Image (cartoon, rainbow, N blue to C red):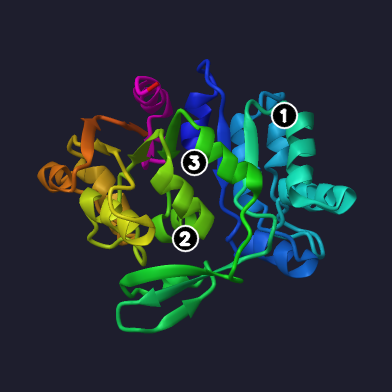
Amino acid sequence: MPVLLRGLKNLPVDLRAVVTVADDGGSTGRIRSEMEIPAPGDIRNVIAALSDAEPMLLELFQHRFQEGNGLTGHSLGNLLLAAMTSMTGNFNQGIKEISRVLNVKGEIFPISNENMSLHAIMEDGEIIHGESNIPLSGKRIKRVFLEPQPLKPLPNAIESIQTADLIVVSPGSLYTSIMPNLIVPEVKEALLKAKAKIVYVCNIMTQYGETTSYSAADHVQAIHDHVGDACVDYVIVHNQPIDQQIQDIYKKEGAFPVEADIDRLKAMNVQVVPGNIVVKHKDGTLRHNNVKIAEMLYQFL
């Protein structure tokens, strides 16, 4: 999501980002456990993406401590979000205040003000508990679900879906970053009733432990299985060859290019928008081209 938002924030659009709070690893997991608040990590990254603050201030916000008793591994931004939540008594209000300080364009909403946990049912029937543990099993995922139930979504998040002119499902870890938003019952209902078109920006590479061997159609099918058939109207896919040297880097992590199986997507009544949507990062890996994708998304409005 942060990658897309960096491109979209420069366009004349009213942005509303609905962000997952199911992360339970690293600094986020420790803060969740100690303060019993929703996960701040993904929120922090979205704030940084939409902020127009001075670069040094953003670098400070994203700074992660490498040493210090109790501080090692913590991100300063996570600590600030936790502090602001403590001051305001409300996670969503804390996000608003931090967003104001950092001159954020648009609005950022957590999917819920509640502390939630993500779990997965694997194809062999085993249940894996906790977002950070799910990819470690190496097994194929059948379905994910949230606790506690019923989970109360943030009203602003639902209202944002209901009134949107365009709904974008961002790339990212399919089951542990994208699904936690989509499977909240009120969110599913709002998506299926939405008047706006729903566009999914598909991942470039598969992810070991989550989407091994998945094609673009498999990604969309997983969304439909969790939300409902015909949820996705359009899918943006990368359809150009990826250099073997880059593939070799990803292969070490068990990741491979996502096949753009366009005929199968069309058979699912999903309209396909293919293109060269990647840029090479300085470390040799690939990123979605946020400028190009933002321009593609703007054409839907």
Q: At label 1, which amino acid type do we have? A: Met
Q: Going by the picture, which residue comes out furthest to the top? A: 12
Q: Going by the picture, which residue comes out furthest to the right? A: 87
Q: Secondary structure at mark 1?
A: helix
Q: At label 2, which amino acid type do we have? A: Thr
The one of 2 and 262 positioned closer to us in this rendering: 262
- Depicted 16 relative to depicted 179: above or below: above
User: Which residue appears at 62% of the width and 65% of the height?
Assistant: 116
The verdict on residue 282 being magenta is yes
- Residue 95, visible in the rendered structure: yes
The one of 87 and 165 positioned closer to us in this rendering: 165
The one of 224 and 21 positioned closer to us in this rendering: 224
User: Which residue appears at 42% of the width and 54% of the height?
Assistant: 173
Q: Which mark is residue 56?
A: 1
- Depicted 16 relative to depicted 219: above or below: above
Q: Dot 2 corresponds to which residue?
A: 176
Q: Dot 3 corresponds to which residue?
A: 1
- Residue 206, visible in the rendered structure: no
3 or 2: tag closer to the N-terminus: 3
Name the mark nearer the viewer: 1 or 2.
2
**Side of 269 relative to 59 (left or right):** left
Name the mark nearer the viewer: 1 or 3.
3
Rendered image quadrant of residue 193: top left
Marks 1 and 2 sit apart, C-alpha to C-alpha, by: 31 Å
Q: Quadrant of the C terminus?
A: top left
Rendered image quadrant of residue 141: bottom left
Q: Position of residue 34 (x, y in %)?
A: 78, 68
Stretch of the chain drawn in magenta: 281-300
Mark 1 residue crowding within 10 angstroms, few (<14) / some (14–19) / many (20+):
few
- Depicted 65 relative to depicted 30: above or below: above
Q: At label 3, which amino acid type do we have? A: Met
